[in-house]
């Protein structure tokens, strides 16, 4: 489904570019020489794709940082083509300060984030559930994480990812009879959690830009948060204390 959506987006952008180039050629701004037209086509492609990814990121899907970078890079190349500024493809290294901008936005508002005590820190750096206890939290990780193997054991987690999706299926997990803290944070991505009916839990979910759905409780937009606690959470001995936070993305928690 995601591949079909991506290919459809590429096809739509290609049609838009073809029409734009034909209009510019017809009014004499550029000539219909392929090599000359190509100098305008690929920067415009970067801009359109970047804007789409940025818009998707604002709506809660991954791609906010990458999309804005592509849009800025393509725009500078187009300004060069129209002789407004001097900027070539090789000047991409000059945009490295954008990394500081993205980093600044990623920690913006951190002073108001709820302080949480974490005794355990586990980093999961493969596609399937294979855990390693690390002395420090992993930084700048990219990739998807899947916890859906049969009878995988739930342990205290403290996960951080720059870009990537999480899928946790607790209906297939072995959950010990104890209180288990789980923290999942990241810049951009999706978090999907499937819970069984008989597990007591408390969930605190935050997104800077995106949407949250926790057992039908919805929040969508900018700086959204949802709190949920099962009725017997405080009295239960087996329970999950879950904290979820994304800068841009989508959080969904369902029961079966």
Image: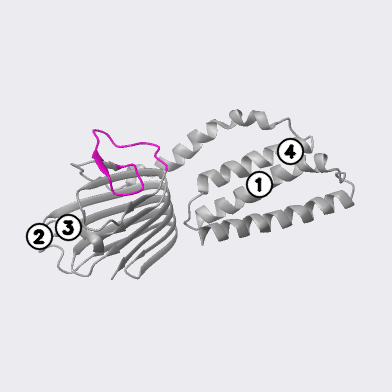
Crowd around label 3: few <14 · some 14–19 · many ≥20 (10 Å): some
Distance from label 1 to label 3 (Cα)? 47 Å
**The furthest residue to the front:** 150
Crowd around label 1: few <14 · some 14–19 · many ≥20 (10 Å): many
**Residue 231: x %, y % from top left:** 18, 69
Which picture quadrant has residue 118? top left
Mark 1 or mark 4, which is nearer to you? 1
Which picture quadrant has residue 168? bottom left
Mark 1 or mark 3, which is nearer to you? 3
Q: Where the C terminus falls, by quadrant?
A: bottom left
Q: Is the magenta stretch mostly helix, strand or loop?
A: loop
The tag earlier along the polypeptide, 4 or 2, is 4
Numbered circle sitting on residue 79: 4
Per the image, the residue denoted by label 3 is 175
The tag earlier along the polypeptide, 1 or 4, is 1
Distance from label 4 to label 2 (Cα)? 63 Å
Per the image, the residue denoted by label 2 is 237
What range is drawn magenta here?
A: 124-142
**Residue 170: x %, y % from top left:** 25, 60
Per the image, the residue denoted by label 1 is 47
The tag earlier along the polypeptide, 1 or 3, is 1
Left or right of residue 50: residue 115 = left
**Residue 39: x %, y % from top left:** 76, 39
Left or right of residue 118: residue 193 = right
Asked if the residue at tag 4 contacts the one at tag 1, i.e. Cβ–Cβ closer than 8 Å, the answer is no
Residue 139 forms part of the magenta stretch: yes
């Amino acid at each position: 489904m995601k591949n079909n959506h991506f290919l459809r987006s590429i096809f739509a952008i290609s049609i838009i570019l073809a029409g734009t180039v034909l209009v510019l050629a017809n009014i004499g701004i550029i000539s219909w020489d392929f090599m000359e037209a190509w100098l305008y086509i690929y920067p415009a492609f970067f801009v359109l794709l970047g804007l789409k990814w940025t818009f998707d990121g604002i709506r809660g899907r991954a791609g906010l940082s990458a999309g804005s970078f592509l849009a800025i890079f393509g725009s500078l190349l187009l300004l060069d083509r129209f002789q407004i500024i001097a900027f070539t493809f090789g000047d991409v290294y000059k945009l490295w300060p954008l990394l500081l901008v993205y980093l600044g936005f990623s920690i913006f508002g951190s002073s108001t984030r709820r302080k949480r005590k974490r005794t355990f820190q586990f980093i999961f750096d493969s596609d399937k559930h294979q855990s390693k206890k690390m002395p420090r939290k992993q930084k700048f990780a990219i990739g998807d994480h899947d916890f859906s193997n049969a009878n995988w054991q739930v342990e205290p987690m403290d996960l951080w990812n720059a870009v990537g999706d999480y899928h946790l299926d607790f209906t297939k997990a072995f959950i010990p009879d104890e209180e288990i803290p789980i923290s999942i944070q990241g810049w951009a991505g999706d978090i999907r959690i499937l819970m069984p009916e008989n597990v007591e839990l408390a969930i605190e979910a935050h997104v800077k830009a995106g949407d949250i759905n926790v057992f039908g409780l919805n929040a969508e937009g900018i700086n959204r948060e949802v709190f949920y606690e099962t009725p017997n959470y405080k009295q239960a001995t087996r329970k999950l204390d879950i904290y979820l936070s994304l800068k841009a993305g989508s959080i969904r928690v369902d029961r079966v």
